[in-house]
Amino acid sequence: MLRLGKQKCCFSYRSLSFFHGHQRFYKSSFGPLFFAGGVAGVSFLVASILDYEKRKKMYENRGSIRGIFNNLKSSFNTSRSSTPSILQDVKDVFNRMTAGDKTAWTIIVANTAVFLLWQFPSMQSTMLKHFTSTINSPSYTLLTSVFSHNAPIHLFFNMMAVHSFVPMLVDQVMGVEQFAAMYLTSGVVSALGSRIVRAMIGYNTYSLGASGALFGLLGFLSHSSTMQVSVFFFGPFPLSNVFWASMAFDAFSLVFRNSLGWDHAAHLAGGMFGVLYFRVLKPMVWDRRMEMLEKIGYKGYKNK
């Protein structure tokens, strides 16, 4: 995430006290905490149901005449030509993409659309209110700010990261449903972490961007694979080493307030959530989703 210019503050760092920091924390964080928990719960519940229904449909259609007919019908519909048009060409290209590519480009298009809204002077006040997160912003901005970039270079590098490893994560590791829930939750948790830190130290800036969510994915991927990456033409290095080096840099910068305009608290919160999800939450929640869904009425399908 990126931090924008600081708003007016009625106190200085020198006058900051432990009591006042906690007072601001309690005042500004309860609503966002409930919102973040709600987003996480709803995201994973919906993802589990969608994954359940998809697998159930595949199981029921496997080897059946209806399944074969539906596959032939789907192939016919996707290959059938129609009146040439730019829209049809885009649709054809999209249909030929893998699920991972579709997911990545959906994120890129959504972020680009919000970026374009930032370019209209008449939209500035609306975007600041609804698509940036401050310690006084409505709770929903924890989510909307994740899709918000107002600087071209910020958008470019984040979307390059999305294009680089989201397709692999979706197609080979997580699937669309788990990825979507993980991405949204990582983004909200990173924005929440940033908001809590700013409330504690009284540093009320605007925060926006997808990098906190991306750090969550990076934290997950660095512990779930043995991937190696190059950094500025040096390497390759184990992804886990690169991840922890980045986290150390963010921690150092946060402690010594060497921000460079980056939201180090969001990076740290997102990255730690990614590690926590892989180590604890995935085994407890996602890997037991079928069992949990059966407890709320989804019964009769045992194949994972």
Image (cartoon, rainbow, N blue to C red):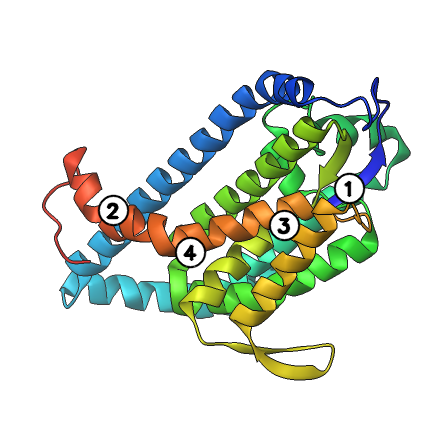
Q: Position of residue 33 (x, y in %)?
A: 51, 27
Amino acid residing under circle 4: Val
Question: What residue is shown with label 4?
Answer: 176
- Marks 1/2 in contact by CB < 8 Å: the verdict is no
Question: In which quadrant is the C terminus drawn?
Answer: bottom left
Amino acid residing under circle 2: Arg
Query: Going 72% across and 82% down the picture, which residue do you hit?
Result: 233
Question: What residue is shown with label 3?
Answer: 267
Cα gap from disc 4 to disc 3, whole angstroms: 23 Å
The answer to whether 226 is drawn above or below residue 67 in the figure is below
**Among the two numbered marks 1 and 2 on one chain, the one whose residue lies closer to the N terminus:** 1
Question: What residue is shown with label 2?
Answer: 289
Cα gap from disc 1 to disc 3, whole angstroms: 12 Å
The answer to whether 260 is drawn above or below residue 99 in the figure is above
Query: Going 84% across and 27% down the picture, which residue do you hit?
Result: 7
Cα gap from disc 2 to disc 4, whole angstroms: 15 Å
From this viewpoint, which residue is outermost toward the left? 300
Q: Position of residue 131 (x, y in %)?
A: 70, 33
